[in-house]
Amino acid sequence: MALEHLVALPPGPVRVRLDRSELNLAERGGFEACWAGEETNDLEVLEVDAYRSLVKAHLAEVYRLREGQDPPGITLNLASHQLIDDLVGWSKLNAQNR
């Protein structure tokens, strides 16, 4: 149930692999990120807001599979914003490694 996308962040495009199938929505992390190289022509670059929509849908599906019901809206919103914030933080910490 992993997703892979290119996300446009201020330092540059990042390839993100999202897999939270073993995590609770409230837990941090659940993604792998690396700077996008030239081999990214197979993926469309998404703006952060578009990626957040995909993240929310993915996290909702993970929750449904694990809990058998829809997630509370506030929990889903917080989890998606937290993941995006963590991703932006990762990009700032690793901007020198581009």
Image (cartoon, rainbow, N blue to C red):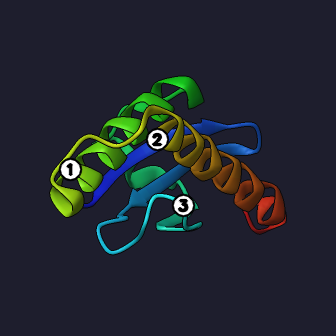
Q: Is mark 1 on a helix, strand or loop?
A: helix
Residue type for callout 3 = Ala
Residue type for callout 1 = Arg
3D distance between C-alphas at marks 2 and 3: 9 Å
The answer to which of 61 and 71 lies nearer the viewer is: 71
Question: Looking at the rendering, which quadrant does residue 95 occupy?
Answer: bottom right
Q: What element carries label 3?
A: loop
The answer to which of 86 and 93 lies nearer the viewer is: 86
Task: Look at 59% across and 66% down and name the residue there.
Answer: 28
Neighbours of disc 3 within 10 Å: few (<14), some (14-19), many (20+): few
The residue labelled by disc 2 is: 76
Please indicate, yes or no, whether residue 31 appears anywhere in the rendered image.
yes
Task: Look at 54% across and 63% down and name the residue there.
Answer: 33
The residue labelled by disc 3 is: 26
Task: Look at 55% across and 67% down and name the residue there.
Answer: 27
The tag earlier along the polypeptide, 1 or 2, is: 1
Q: Where is residue 73 in the image (x, y as percent from the top left)?
A: 44, 32
Residue 64's mark?
A: 1
Task: Look at 81% across and 55% down and name the residue there.
Answer: 92
Quadrant of the frame with the C terminus: bottom right
Residue type for callout 2 = Leu
Neighbours of disc 1 within 10 Å: few (<14), some (14-19), many (20+): few
Q: Is mark 2 on a helix, strand or loop?
A: helix
In this picture, residue 52 sits left or right of residue 18: right
